[in-house]
């Protein structure tokens, strides 16, 4: 019985290969041999079959060297037979290479040896034992002459192997090339170990190749025998033992030799773990198996055997056989022997099955992993591992669409289940995802943060309903697609790989209505959605996640109902949903695999979430089982089908089955996969995405219930250790070590090394209160969890390839809303801008990414620098002294005569590739640490500590604390994408007393860290040596008034060059020396507060110049050759514009100012070493007048001049503003540098202001300034080092005005470069962040980043301007947007081209022929209503000039003419009681004349001139007017309808209602009821229009066949901030209150839009009213109004930028109801009207909006045009520009957007009465000369241009050659491109000489014709008296 018991051990090894009937698998290998020594002795065979060395007791193996002696081996067949009887199937045979081929030559074998081994093999075969032949064992035989070439060993071995295959191959089908690799490698005669490895590998691989090509026809297999130490090394790198790297392709199975040390099982488990990771799913043969120090083996052999089984034989293990020698040796100690031989022993199959039940079952992966760590001490468990992650490790961060995007209904997005869930109030404090982080509008913001963080991956999800609003591809959200395309592209630009999740919980609500994930049809819907995503984004996305945490979807969405769709069905729905998700995942994986993988080369996986489960009572086996059950219910539920066998885990299935059996009803229903589905699901992941946050203690439930529930079904209960740190979420505790264990489990159970693990979600929430920025808890969490991942990789050989932190930003966190903060960046959800501020954790995680983990030592400093855009250091040319005035006065001559249009035209383009973009700061303003680490005091330290010196008594003691925030600053610089960073060195921080005997190493270290960080991120340091913070110790000896400072400054500079110059290649000696000299030593406003304006500034400047020159020469002589940098100084320059450019004295004053400001320092350095002549002359003369013996301006010696001249390599400047200057005779006393200039400065009040009184934004001054430097100093390489604007507000990240500043200033720099040839090399914005602004403290904010100075952490928040500037940098300028590019093409045939007028504006004859009074007659005759007291009494006198007007129309070539009928001219009292036939006759004659000219009349019934008689009874406020208007319309239809086919009922009803009855700036001028009257008037206007339409439609249309509709005016409204949802809402609100007020009832549903109704009703109720102030239509009225149009008449002129503005509740007005304010963009061209900015892009957008909003109605543009003011200029290039671009945008709307545009009407035919502004503003193609009684009409250049567009029906492409529509005669319209070569000035135009000559002849001809025409007109019409006009302050915009 003992024998039977012992031999069960053997069968345990093979038990995993039992078939279902208990028999051994047919091909299972049980391998014996060579004989163990002891057994050979027992068999008395040792002298026959054992070599001599085997007799040594230390040798544990005998070699089958049977053929060495001539022996009798008759007993062997019996022995072999007995081996077979007990179950051995194979036998090891070691061939002796040296004896088979004694000479190493396969042609000369030892035939006796060959025959002997053939006999042995035959003997084995006869005994039914299959030989396993080892070709070579241990070292290289001495008889084999390998030679010195690495290839010779392989050549010899392959010859031997092929010989062996040939002669023995018929007897064996299992081969090993080598065993005992270490000894073999050692014996190879190569000194280089790598060569040995290569030789061995080559020998094996070639033998493998030969075998399979020639000898393996019967299915033979070949491998190599690996020793115990070789197991993990053969595939992993770096190697552990023999360095032999083996691939699957060169072995048919894996042959292992194992050692098991009893008592030291942990090492064995680790080794086995490594093996499993490397060789998962590979066939394994245990070639040799040894037990060491296993004294207890006899008593309980099951212990080690079970351990090995558990370690190797996991579920479905692929072990093909074992070495059984140990068991034979063990058993032989008890065998009885006889002379006849062995006493037989055997074990039948029955006995095997009988004893298997008693065997110890193999341990699961969970048990193995748990036991690995179970005995760890806390110290060992929590020890921090100081190491780095493998090279190529991927770091990332993540978000989810519904967490951050917002824009829940924007751009056609469909509703998601989370949208509905929030709107139903299921979330904390009724919060919703409506706006969230507004990331849909903030792509550039989020990428900005990512650039700062610099991960390699960004995991985000696509919102299914944003792409497919209804869940299917029937409708596609193209704007949503654009959003993701932009995000992906921007990520790739930033070198960040997108990892895209297809489904992150936000199911389209439309699909949930159909059952959601419970409906199998969703599988196809999901596949279609995925297919679209792969097609659309897959060319750029290489990491795809099908589902994020499907357990959460199944458990929380359909089990507990905590998540949407809120279904509580844990027993049925939850499992059904999981089943559906698994099949959907598989389908999508196969879709990608079959259709996209080969081309796109991406990876598809999914992310599964899992806690780690630890048994609460480790000694309780039930708790251990419950822990494993919990993991299988959570992780295995999804992982097992995909990563193991296509089916659910057995534990899960068994548990559910058991629960259902115990209960009377079905508690849980687990769907079943078909066999086909299992195959389909298995293996459908290219990576294992793991999401992990916490761990649990688990106990088994003893008294389970039958109530369906996650824990009750699983029969487990979850707990936590009270000592585990808590987080803001009750479900997440900090248990870092759980991650390592979970990773080991995943590797053991699912992935091995074939499938990488991506940690795709790890993080912790903090609360929404307390310190939201300094999140030290999160820092510690990340530090410890990431370190556990590192341990898993380094210590446990787990193949983790990525770590992704959750999350990039705070977001919407499910049912917790915004109360849980997971973000690396804080989002302020109380601020509609949703500002993002990096937390401490962001900076920490960034450092982990940068260091790739936790290196024990920071790498040494780099000594190289990446330098962008720097010129090769070279001497600038010598220049002569400036003249008086200087030649640079040509700049004023060139630019001061520009028109506003020429000056302000925005230019698009980019800078040169090597252009350098940066930001700037200075030490005292930013560093803080004023007395830290040994820093000495500076003059600013002392100055600011005196109360009253600085506003609010602010100091720079802490400032931004940059001294302690190097990493934070570099983070934001990296986010900006700058190429350089300009900062200054604090002299007293490096030399505390100003001298080199006091070096402060801490200060040096700070700057080294800063510079190293910059260089590491490819940011060039531009370093200023002196930015005003003089060591106080040096001021104590006189400061810059003491020439000793020249030497001391040089000493400081020398130290800096020596210390930092290996990395700093751009040096500035002084920042703004003029400020030092004048403000510090002249006015004394700055420290050291020397008030000596007449002498000290000149003396100090003298010293500064010499100090600068000294430092320059030090660098030039000592360092330039080795360091190769450039050095200069930085000057401050305002632009100065002569107040009267035509006045020579003002021009000379401007030149003089520039020389005193700039030339003071630039002239000596960049010209001749001396001061400007004008400065020497002026100061000298004034000194003489002041009775001084010599000039107050010091004199340089000739030697000094030569020393100073040329001491700059580049020209650097700071500029902020401009001034106007005039010549002034200034007083002689007191002496002053300021008075010496003899000028007076001023500013233009229209220039935009800033936080500093002297800093107005005058962008065009920058271009002129740069041109001045070019002309004055020979166009040196120029760098703008500071440029920016201060804003007063303390907290506003939406800094719109700063963006406008940069937008215009940078464009002027671009013009200087592109148009003027200025050698501009770089631009730096001032400033990097808010900081100490000198005398103003912290009040003016210049920063691109907001700093909260009330927070000791000094958090930095990117402003909108930072994101804007980053875009400028990214684009290297301002490239022309694709949508702005000009489109060539034609409008549709029969397109209507028209021009418009209005009766009151042109007709005049206000009392002629019986005309009645209109409201405009009365209004214009009321004082102070109209500018200049103008009126329309005569206007253009068109009532008497039909022929002239029609002639103009004919010359314009229009097909249509839009005009209006004066109601009071036809019906003087507004009613049909009296018809004025004379008035009606005028219109009949006009219409006849138009038709005769083939021009179609477009007639407006009402264009604002209501009969005064009707106004006297209430006008449009009296609803009887509806009938009056209908009667008036009917008269016109009757009398004119047979000839008029195009009717407009009302023109711009908005202006009638709002301006006429609300604001009161138009007739009738009512403003007393602004909250009611406009709505009443609008109500009646809509009803009047509807009645007129129905009248025509029902009575006249059939006979007359015309069109009738309404004309509505509208601006386009852009959001002021395009990254802000609130501003999008404001823009939408603006449009609905403007165009929607009238369009929505008519073109949609007969009623007002919901925006208006809701806003006005809510405000009305809040005001205490019982109902809305907006009237309501009855249902019948709605039906009558709806659809009363034949086309959409549109008047459009301009665009506004809209933003929310909430008025006080008590204000009753239309504006307050609308709740929107608007501004304009400073870069937009102006016009003659304050409200009209030239914005062509808005025209196209408005047309698109009308198309989408009102179902693409036919549109006729009925007005569009631009005004002018001031002196008449017939060459109205601005108007040509306007029409060219606006009409081109209309063409784009037609051609590109499919807008049904039928016609275009320009406003206006001729200059006319422009309402409240009278005749000040002129819109006409024709100028009307009102000073001439005949009112002649003269064409402007725009008239001809418009006629040409009409002739061409658009814009023919010049690339196709000359077009017939283009006139052949020369064009007198000039090309206004600045700087044309070969041009001459003609009448203020830039023309080529040839065109100028032609223009001259044309002018002569036109003059003659004009004179003749005037004579004829005068003769015909006589003289008309002039009209008089008076000034009025009231203005009415022409809308």
Image: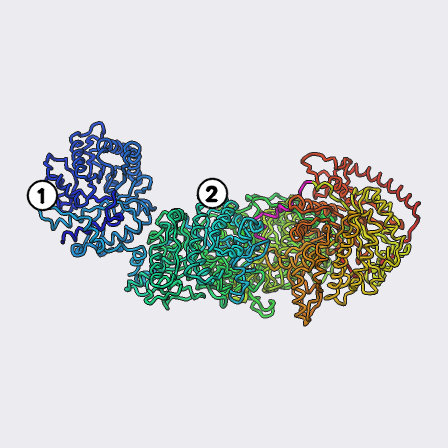
Instruction: Where is residue 529? Give x, y as percent.
Output: 51, 49
Observer able to see residue 933: no
Relative placement, left or right, of 1798 versus 877 is: right
Q: How many residues crowd around disc 2 within 10 Å: few (fewer than 14), some, or many (20 or more)? A: some
Instruction: Kindly check if marks 2 and 1 are in contact, taking CB atoms under 8 A apart as contact.
Output: no
Q: How many residues crowd around disc 1 within 10 Å: few (fewer than 14), some, or many (20 or more)? A: some
Relative placement, left or right, of 89 versus 1075 is: left
Q: Residue furthest top?
A: 107
Q: Which mark is residue 341?
A: 1
Asked if residue 1777 is positioned above or below residue 732 in the image, the reply reads above
Spatial CA span between label 2 and label 1: 68 Å
Q: Secondary structure at mark 1?
A: strand
Q: How is the image coloured?
A: rainbow
Q: Secondary structure at mark 2?
A: helix
Number of residue marks? 2
Instruction: Where is residue 1510? Give x, y as percent.
Output: 83, 62
Q: Which mark is residue 1158?
A: none
Q: Which residues are magenta?
A: 1363-1385
**Foreground residue among 639 and 835:** 639
Instruction: Where is residue 1232? Give x, y as percent.
Output: 68, 60
Relative placement, left or right, of 532 versus 1570 is: left
Is 1377 contained in the magenta span?
yes
Is 1408 contained in the magenta span?
no
Asked if residue 90 is positioned above or below residue 1701 in the image, the reply reads above
Name the quadrant of the C terminus: bottom right
Observer able to see residue 1581: yes
**Foreground residue among 751 and 523:** 523
The earlier-in-sequence mark between 2 and 1 is 1
Q: Residue furthest bottom?
A: 1664
**Foreground residue among 986 and 756:** 756
Residue with the mark numbered 2:
596
Instruction: Where is residue 1288? Give x, y as percent.
Output: 63, 63
């Amino acid at each position: 019985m003992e024998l039977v018991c012992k031999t069960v051990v053997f069968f345990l090894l093979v038990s995993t290969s039992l078939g279902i009937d208990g028999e051994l698998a047919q091909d299972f290998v049980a391998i014996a041999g060579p004989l163990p020594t002891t057994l050979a002795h027992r068999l008395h065979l040792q002298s026959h079959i054992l070599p001599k060395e085997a007799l040594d007791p230390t040798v544990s193996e005998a070699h089958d060297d049977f053929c060495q002696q001539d022996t009798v081996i008759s007993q062997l067949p019996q022995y072999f037979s007995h081996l077979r009887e007990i179950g051995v199937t194979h036998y090891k045979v070691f061939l002796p290479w040296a004896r088979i081929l004694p000479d190493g030559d396969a042609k000369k074998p030892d035939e006796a040896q060959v025959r002997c081994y053939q006999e042995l093999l035959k003997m084995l075969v006869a005994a039914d034992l299959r030989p396993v032949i080892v070709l070579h064992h241990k070292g290289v035989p001495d008889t084999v002459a390998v030679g010195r070439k690495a290839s010779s060993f392989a050549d010899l071995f392959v010859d031997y192997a092929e010989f062996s295959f040939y002669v023995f191959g018929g007897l064996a089908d299992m081969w090993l090339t080598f065993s005992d690799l270490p000894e073999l490698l050692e014996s190879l005669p190569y000194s280089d170990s790598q060569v040995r490895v290569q030789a061995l590998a080559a020998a094996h691989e070639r033998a493998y190749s030969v075998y399979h090509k020639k000898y393996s026809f019967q299915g033979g297999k070949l491998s190599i025998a690996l020793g115990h130490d070789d197991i993990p090394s053969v595939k992993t790198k770096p190697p552990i033992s023999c360095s032999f790297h083996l691939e699957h392709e060169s072995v048919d199975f894996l042959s292992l030799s194992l050692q098991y040390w009893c008592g030291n099982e942990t090492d064995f488990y680790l080794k086995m773990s490594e093996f499993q990771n490397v060789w998962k799913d590979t066939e394994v043969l245990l070639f040799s198996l040894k037990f060491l120090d296993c004294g207890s083996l006899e008593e309980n052999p099951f212990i080690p055997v079970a351990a090995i089984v558990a370690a190797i034989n996991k579920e479905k293990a692929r072990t093909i056989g074992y070495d059984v020698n140990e068991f034979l040796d063990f058993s032989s100690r008890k065998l009885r022997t006889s002379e006849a031989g062995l006493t037989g022993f055997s074990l039948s199959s029955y006995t095997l099955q009988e004893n298997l039940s008693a065997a110890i079952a193999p341990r699961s992966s969970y048990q193995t992993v748990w036991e690995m760590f179970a005995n760890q001490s806390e110290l060992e468990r929590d020890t921090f591992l100081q190491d780095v992650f493998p090279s190529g490790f991927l770091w990332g961060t993540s978000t989810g669409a519904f967490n951050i995007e917002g824009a829940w209904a924007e751009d056609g997005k469909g509703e998601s289940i989370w949208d509905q869930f929030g709107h139903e109030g299921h979330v904390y404090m009724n919060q919703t995802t409506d706006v969230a982080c507004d990331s849909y509008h903030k792509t550039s913001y989020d990428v900005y943060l990512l650039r700062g963080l610099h991960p390699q991956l960004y995991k985000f999800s696509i919102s299914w309903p944003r792409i497919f609003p209804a869940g299917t591809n029937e409708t596609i959200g193209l704007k949503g697609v654009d959003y993701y395309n932009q995000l992906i592209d921007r990520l790739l630009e930033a070198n960040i790989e997108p990892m895209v999740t297809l489904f992150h919980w936000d199911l389209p609500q439309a699909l949930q209505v159909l059952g959601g994930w419970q409906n199998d049809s969703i599988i196809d819907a999901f596949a279609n959605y995925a297919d679209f995503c792969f097609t659309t984004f897959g060319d750029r996305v290489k990491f795809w996640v099908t589902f994020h945490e499907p357990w959460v979807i199944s458990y929380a969405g359909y089990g507990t109902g905590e998540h949407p769709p809120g279904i509580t069905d844990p027993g049925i729905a939850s499992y059904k949903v999981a089943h559906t998700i698994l099949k959907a995942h598989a389908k999508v994986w196969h879709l990608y695999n079959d259709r996209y993988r080969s081309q796109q080369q991406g990876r598809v996986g999914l992310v599964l979430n899992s806690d780690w489960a630890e048994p609460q009572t480790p000694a309780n086996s039930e708790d251990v089982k419950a822990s494993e059950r919990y993991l299988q219910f959570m992780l295995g539920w999804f992982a097992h089908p995909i990563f193991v066998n296509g089916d659910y885990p057995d534990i899960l299935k068994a548990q559910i089955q058991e629960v259902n059996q115990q209960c009377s009803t079905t508690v849980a229903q687990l769907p079943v996969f078909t066999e086909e589905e299992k195959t389909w699901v298995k293996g459908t992941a290219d990576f294992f995405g793991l999401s992990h946050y916490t761990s649990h203690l688990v106990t088994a439930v003893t008294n389970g219930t039958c109530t369906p529930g996650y824990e009750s079904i699983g029969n487990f209960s979850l707990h936590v250790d009270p000592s585990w740190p808590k987080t803001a979420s009750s479900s997440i505790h900090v248990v870092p070590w759980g991650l390592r264990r979970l990773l080991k489990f995943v590797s053991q159970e699912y992935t091995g090394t074939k499938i990488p693990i991506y940690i795709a979600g790890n993080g912790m929430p903090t609360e929404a209160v307390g310190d939201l920025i300094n999140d030290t808890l999160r820092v510690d969490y990340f530090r410890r969890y990431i370190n556990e991942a590192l341990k898993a990789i380094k210590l446990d050989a787990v193949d983790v390839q990525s770590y992704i932190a959750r999350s990039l930003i705070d977001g919407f966190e499910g049912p917790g809303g915004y109360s849980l903060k997971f973000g690396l960046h804080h989002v302020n959800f109380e601020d509609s801008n949703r500002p993002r501020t990096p937390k401490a954790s962001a900076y920490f995680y960034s450092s982990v990414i940068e260091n790739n983990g936790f290196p024990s030592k920071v790498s040494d400093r780099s000594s190289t620098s990446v330098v962008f855009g720097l010129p090769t250091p070279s001497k600038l040319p010598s220049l002569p002294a400036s003249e008086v005035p200087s030649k640079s006065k040509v700049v004023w001559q060139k630019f001061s005569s520009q028109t506003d249009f020429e000056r302000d035209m925005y230019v698009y383009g980019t800078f040169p590739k090597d252009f350098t973009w940066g930001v700037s700061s200075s030490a005292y303003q930013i560093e803080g640490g004023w007395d830290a680490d040994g820093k000495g005091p500076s003059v600013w330290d002392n100055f600011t500590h005196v109360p009253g010196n600085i506003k609010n008594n602010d100091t720079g003691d802490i400032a931004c604390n940059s001294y302690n925030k190097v990493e934070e600053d570099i983070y934001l610089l990296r986010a900006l994408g700058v190429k350089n960073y300009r900062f200054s060195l604090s002299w007293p921080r490096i030399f505390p007393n100003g001298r080199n005997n006091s070096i402060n190493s801490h200060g040096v270290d700070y700057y080294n860290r800063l510079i190293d960080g910059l260089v590491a991120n490819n940011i060039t340091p531009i370093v200023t040596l002196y930015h005003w913070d003089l060591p106080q110790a040096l001021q104590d000896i006189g400061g810059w008034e003491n020439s000793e400072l020249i030497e001391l400054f040089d000493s400081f500079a020398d130290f800096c060059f020596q210390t930092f110059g290996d990395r700093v290649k751009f040096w500035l000696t002084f920042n703004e020396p003029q400020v030092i000299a004048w403000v510090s030593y002249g006015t004394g406003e700055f420290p050291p507060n020397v008030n000596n304006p007449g002498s000290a500034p000149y003396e100090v400047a003298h010293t500064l110049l010499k100090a600068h020159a000294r430092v320059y020469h030090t660098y030039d002589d000592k360092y330039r050759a080795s360091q190769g940098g450039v050095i200069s100084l930085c000057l401050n320059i305002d632009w100065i514009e002569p107040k009267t450019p035509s006045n020579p004295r003002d021009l000379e004053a401007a030149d003089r100012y520039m020389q005193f400001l700039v030339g003071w320092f630039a002239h000596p350095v960049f010209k001749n070493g001396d001061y400007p002549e004008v400065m020497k002359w002026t100061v000298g003369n004034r000194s003489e007048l002041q009775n001084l013996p010599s000039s107050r301006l010091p004199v340089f010696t000739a030697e000094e001049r030569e020393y100073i001249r040329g001491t700059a390599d580049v020209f650097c400047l700071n500029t902020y503003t401009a001034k106007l200057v005039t010549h002034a005779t200034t007083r002689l006393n007191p002496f002053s540098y300021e008075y010496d200039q003899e000028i007076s400065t001023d500013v233009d009040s229209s220039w935009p202001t800033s936080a500093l009184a002297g800093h107005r934004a005058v962008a065009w001054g920058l271009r002129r300034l740069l041109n001045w430097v070019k002309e004055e100093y020979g166009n040196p390489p120029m760098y703008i080092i500071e440029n920016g604007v201060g804003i007063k507000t303390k907290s506003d990240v939406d800094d719109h005005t700063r963006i406008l500043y940069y937008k215009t200033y940078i464009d002027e720099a671009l013009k200087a470069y592109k148009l003027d040839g200025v050698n501009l090399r770089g631009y730096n914005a001032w400033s990097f962040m808010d900081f100490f602004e000198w005398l103003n403290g912290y009040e003016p904010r210049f920063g691109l980043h907001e700093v909260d100075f009330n927070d000791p952490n000094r958090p930095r928040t990117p402003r909108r301007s930072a994101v804007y500037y980053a875009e400028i940098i990214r684009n290297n300028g301002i490239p022309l947007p694709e949508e702005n590019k000009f489109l060539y093409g034609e409008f549709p045939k029969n397109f209507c081209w028209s021009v418009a007028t209005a009766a009151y504006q042109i007709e005049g004859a206000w009392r002629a022929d019986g005309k009645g009074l209109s409201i405009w007659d009365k209004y214009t005759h009321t004082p102070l209503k109209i500018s200049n007291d103008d009126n329309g009494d005569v206007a253009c006198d068109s009532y008497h000039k039909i022929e002239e007007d029609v002639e103009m129309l004919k010359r314009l070539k229009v097909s249509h003419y839009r005009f209006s009928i004066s109601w009071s001219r036809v019906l003087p009292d507004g009613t049909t009681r009296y018809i004025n036939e004379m008035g009606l006759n005028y219109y009949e004659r006009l219409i006849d004349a138009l038709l005769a000219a083939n021009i179609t009349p477009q007639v407006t019934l009402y264009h604002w001139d209501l009969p005064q008689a009707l106004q006297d009874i209430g006008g449009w406020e009296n609803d009887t007017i509806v009938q009056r208007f209908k009667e008036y319309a009917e008269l016109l239809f009757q009398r004119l309808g047979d000839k008029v086919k195009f009717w407009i009922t009302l023109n711009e009803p908005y202006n009638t209602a709002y301006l006429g009855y609300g604001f009161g700036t138009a007739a009738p001028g009512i403003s007393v009821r602004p909250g009611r009257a406009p709505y009443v008037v609008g109500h009646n206007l809509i009803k009047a229009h509807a009645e007129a339409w129905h009248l025509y439609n029902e009575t006249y249309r059939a006979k007359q066949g015309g069109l009738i509709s309404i004309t509505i005016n509208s601006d386009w409204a852009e959001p002021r901030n395009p990254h802000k949802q609130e501003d999008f809402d404001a823009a939408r609100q603006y449009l609905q209150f403007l165009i929607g007020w009238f369009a929505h009832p008519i073109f949609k549903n007969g009623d007002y839009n919901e925006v208006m109704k809701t806003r006005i009703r809510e405000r009305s109720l809040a005001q205490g009213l019982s109902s809305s102030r907006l009237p309501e239509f009855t249902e019948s009225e709605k039906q009558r109004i709806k659809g009363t149009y034949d086309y959409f008449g549109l008047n459009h002129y301009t665009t506004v930028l809209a933003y929310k503005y909430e008025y006080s509740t008590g204000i009753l007005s239309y504006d307050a109801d609308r709740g929107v304010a608007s501004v304009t963009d400073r870069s937009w061209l102006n016009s003659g009207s304050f409200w009209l900015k030239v914005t062509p892009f808005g025209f196209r957008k408005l047309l698109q909006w009308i198309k989408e909003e009102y179902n693409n109605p036919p549109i006729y543009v009925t007005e569009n045009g631009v005004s002018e003011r001031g002196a008449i200029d017939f060459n109205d290039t601005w108007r040509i520009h306007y029409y060219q671009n606006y009409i081109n945008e209309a063409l784009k709307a037609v051609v590109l957007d499919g807008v049904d545009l039928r016609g275009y009407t320009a406003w206006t035919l001729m200059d006319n009465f422009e309402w409240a502004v009278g005749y000040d503003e002129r819109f006409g193609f024709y100028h009307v000369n009102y000073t001439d009684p005949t009112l002649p009409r003269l064409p402007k250049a725009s008239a001809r241009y418009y006629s040409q567009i009409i002739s061409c029906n658009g814009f023919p492409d010049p690339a196709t050659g000359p077009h017939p529509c283009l006139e052949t005669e020369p064009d007198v319209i000039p090309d206004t491109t600045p700087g044309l070569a070969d041009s001459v000035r003609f009448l203020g135009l830039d023309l080529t000489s040839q065109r100028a000559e032609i223009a001259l002849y044309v002018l002569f001809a036109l003059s003659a014709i004009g004179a003749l025409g005037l004579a004829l007109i005068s003769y015909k019409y006589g003289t008309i008296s002039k009209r008089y006009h008076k000034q009025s302050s009231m203005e009415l915009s022409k809308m």
